[in-house]
């Protein structure tokens, strides 16, 4: 998530319960991943942006968070034993009208242009997202999204990808977010794969970013189905929410410390979350890094479909309307497409690649004189792609290019093109994943020719 910039502060203490797909849906059992040196002062990558390592707080199994006396404490489950003090929380004062109606802050409507990032200047890493800001005066009672874990990126240059649906306080002071992540980080145990992490993030009394993550993090796999659900349990002068990937089991709970004997699951409070998001956030590598620098650092899939979007109650759903935003510094046309703006079964597609057809991230691929073999991925949004294969050079040389599809076919039923001194064009039928692999070869009788493949 982008780092939060305090514009107006709201009272909050909350319930966050984060989980994911059932154990039976995973190809291996749950396993804990992570340790963290919380004494270090270097900056680390989180869904909250770049923040000091000491500001990332681990909530291990058997513990939860409690908001009390303007502090965030880690508590042992089932007891009143305090395990750690994670520091202060900003506590603003809102009157009754503000608490119930919470007029949207216009500065919260454009996350990219706000200059987010307490420690690294503007956070340009919220690359693309869809946003709905609730202005009805009726709180959002539920917000859910279903998506499929994408294919692993083709290459690994140290990038980190975050995909999530979430809800945020209008003032931008906190966010509830069940997050799907790819890549390594100091709190993730160093895997190069997909995992689910459960986050609650807030702004402290000094305006600095703080983040908490529930352990164990859970490794998930390509094609697993995830559903992020945020539910308003109760509303009034303050608000109670749960946020979960149902049935996974690693729940993060934040409770109100006003009454140590209260139920941690149903009696906690948090400020009204008025903005709902579907987001792609990505980093190319080290601290302060820009978005990914290689198209192959994204999944080869053209997009991740955020589907079955549901938001309620009817008083909010009747005015539901996602708007899309894209960062001006993304490198590969990362974008968001609203397929169905319905509040019951809606769909927002987050596109990793441009809508036009690409081969290895470009419109053309050429074999070099030192590399007669090649391969990679063809991606496209549309159902078909025109593929042109060429080979040529000065006479009397012989020049041949061979092109083979890995898991797709041309409209003539073949899966290859062979060209000798000329060009051949065929129409490729794209798989439903909007991506297919390819291999190829160029040969010549001298060093004067060239071969290539172009797509459109």
Image (cartoon, rainbow, N blue to C red):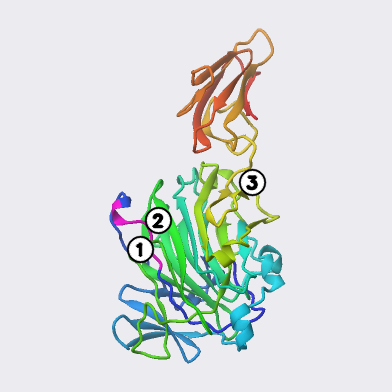
Mark 2 and mark 1 in contact (Cβ < 8 Å)?
A: yes
The residue shown at (56%, 25%) is 428
Left/right placement of residue 353 relative to residue 182 reads right
Of callouts 3 and 1, the N-terminal one: 1
322 or 349, which lies in front? 322
Q: Secondary structure at mark 2?
A: loop
Q: Quadrant of the C terminus?
A: top right
Q: Secondary structure at mark 1?
A: loop
Q: Main secondary structure of the magenta part?
A: loop
Residues rendered magenta in the picture = 18-24
Task: Check disc 3: other Cα within 10 Å, few if <14, some if 14-19, many if 20+.
Answer: some
The residue shown at (60%, 39%) is 361
Look at discs 2 and 3 and give the one toward the viewer: 3
Residue 71 screen position, x and y as percent:
48, 87
Of callouts 1 and 2, the N-terminal one: 1
Of callouts 2 and 3, the N-terminal one: 2
Q: Which residue is mark 1?
A: 33
Q: Which residue is mark 2?
A: 191
Residue 418: name its quadrant. Answer: top right
Q: Which residue is mark 3?
A: 332
């Amino acid at each position: 998530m982008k780092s939060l910039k305090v514009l107006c502060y709201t009272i909050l203490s909350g319930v966050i319960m984060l989980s994911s797909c059932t154990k039976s849906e995973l190809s291996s059992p749950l396993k804990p991943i992570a340790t963290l040196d919380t004494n270090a002062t270097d900056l680390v990558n989180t869904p909250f942006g770049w923040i000091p390592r000491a500001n990332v707080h681990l909530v291990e199994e058997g513990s939860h968070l409690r908001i009390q006396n303007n502090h965030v404490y880690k508590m042992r489950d089932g007891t009143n034993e305090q395990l750690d003090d994670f520091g202060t929380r900003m506590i603003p004062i809102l009157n009754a009208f503000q608490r119930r109606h919470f007029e949207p802050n216009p500065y919260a409507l454009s996350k990219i242009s706000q200059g987010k990032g307490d420690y690294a200047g503007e956070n340009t890493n919220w690359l693309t997202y869809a946003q709905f800001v609730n202005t009805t005066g009726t709180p959002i009672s539920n917000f859910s999204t279903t998506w499929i874990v994408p294919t692993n990126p083709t290459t690994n240059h140290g990038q980190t990808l975050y995909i999530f649906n979430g809800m945020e306080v209008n003032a931008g002071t906190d966010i509830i977010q069940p997050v799907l992540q790819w890549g390594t980080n100091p709190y993730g145990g160093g895997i190069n794969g997909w995992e689910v992490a459960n986050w609650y993030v807030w702004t402290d009394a000094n305006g600095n970013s703080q983040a908490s993550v529930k352990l164990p993090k859970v490794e998930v796999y390509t094609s697993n189905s995830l559903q992020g659900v945020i539910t308003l349990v109760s509303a009034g002068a303050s608000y109670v929410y749960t946020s979960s990937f149902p049935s996974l089991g690693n729940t993060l709970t934040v409770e109100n410390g006003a009454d140590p004997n209260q139920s941690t699951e149903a009696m906690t409070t948090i400020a009204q979350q008025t903005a709902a998001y579907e987001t792609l956030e990505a980093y190319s590598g080290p601290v302060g890094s820009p978005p990914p620098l290689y198209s192959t650092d994204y999944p080869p899939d053209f997009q991740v479909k955020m589907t079955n979007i549901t938001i309620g109650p009817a008083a909010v759903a009747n005015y539901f309307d996602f708007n899309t935003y894209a960062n001006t510094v993304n490198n590969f046309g990362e974008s968001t497409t609203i397929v169905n703006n319905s509040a019951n079964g809606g769909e927002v597609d987050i596109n990793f690649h441009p809508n036009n057809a690409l081969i290895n991230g470009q419109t053309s691929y050429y074999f070099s004189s030192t590399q007669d073999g090649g391969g990679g991925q063809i991606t496209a949004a549309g159902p078909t792609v025109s593929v042109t294969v060429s080979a040529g050079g000065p006479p009397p040389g012989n020049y041949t290019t061979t092109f083979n599809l890995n898991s797709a076919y041309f409209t003539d039923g073949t899966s290859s093109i062979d060209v000798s001194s000329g060009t051949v064009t065929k129409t490729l039928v794209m798989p439903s994943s909007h991506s297919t692999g390819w291999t190829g070869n160029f040969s010549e009788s001298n060093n004067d020719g060239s071969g290539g493949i172009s797509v459109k």
